[in-house]
Image: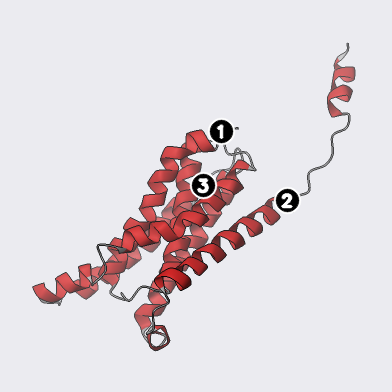
Amino acid sequence: MTTDELVKMLAAGVEPVDPRQMARRFCLALATGTLIAVAFTAGILRLNPALSRYLSEPMFWIREAYCVALSAIALLGVHRLARPGRRLGLVPAALALVIIAMWVLAVVALAPASPQTRTRLVLGATAAVCPFLIALIAAPLFIAHLWIMRGLAPTRLRLAGAAAGFAAGSMGALVYSLHCPELAAPFIGIWYLCGILIPTMLGAWLGPWLLRW
């Protein structure tokens, strides 16, 4: 068999891949995961009754912008790691920049505060449960991101799993904010990030097994 004949045999019956397939997979998975997360938050945890009043608070919008920014950047990372040969580029630096910006706000809030006030700004009333509730809400989104990855071709499996977990945690934090009564920058900078890192570490651990292809 000649090389030309081998190439023709391998190419026989090959159908072109729909370039919109990845976009449809992303949309379906994220819509399903988000709906489940919102339903759990609204139905089990309940929405914060003071939510309408928080709309006039600048820290409410800073908190939401923080979660949205982390989610958007992390989704870009998932999109890139889902394909072989793609680099993360500035994704890690962008995530670090958003996190550091929140930490700067936290320092600004803590600096003039008394010791008792500092404790309240850091711990709030829900520090003991906040990270775990974010991780719990992120669970359907975590499954959705892993499903996205498994349908594509990630090669750096541990990093891809961590990216899926970080994206799920960031989106979970955004959904959780509809229930959360905390608006202090130190609280958000510490405990929201802890909640996001739980599925991130889980994804890094499970990635090599669940994303193998």
Residue 21, labelled with which disc? 2
Quarter occupied by the C terminus: top right
N-terminal label among 2 and 1: 2
The residue carrying mark 1 is 212
N-terminal label among 2 and 3: 2
Res 138 → quadrant: bottom left
Along the horizontal axis of the image, is 3 left or right of 71? Answer: right
- Location of residue 125 in the rendering, given as x and y in whole percent from the top left corner: 23, 72
N-terminal label among 1 and 3: 3
The residue carrying mark 3 is 88
Q: Residues within 10 Å of mark 1 (few under 14, many from 20)?
A: some
- Location of residue 131 in the rendering, given as x and y in whole percent from the top left corner: 33, 59
Query: Which amino acid type is marked by label 1?
Result: Arg
Along the horizontal axis of the image, is 36 left or right of 121? Answer: right
Label 1 residue SS:
loop
Label 3 residue SS:
loop
Q: Give the mark toward the camera: 1 or 3.
A: 1
Q: CA distance from mark 2 to mark 1?
A: 20 Å
> Is 19 placed above or below 55 here?
above
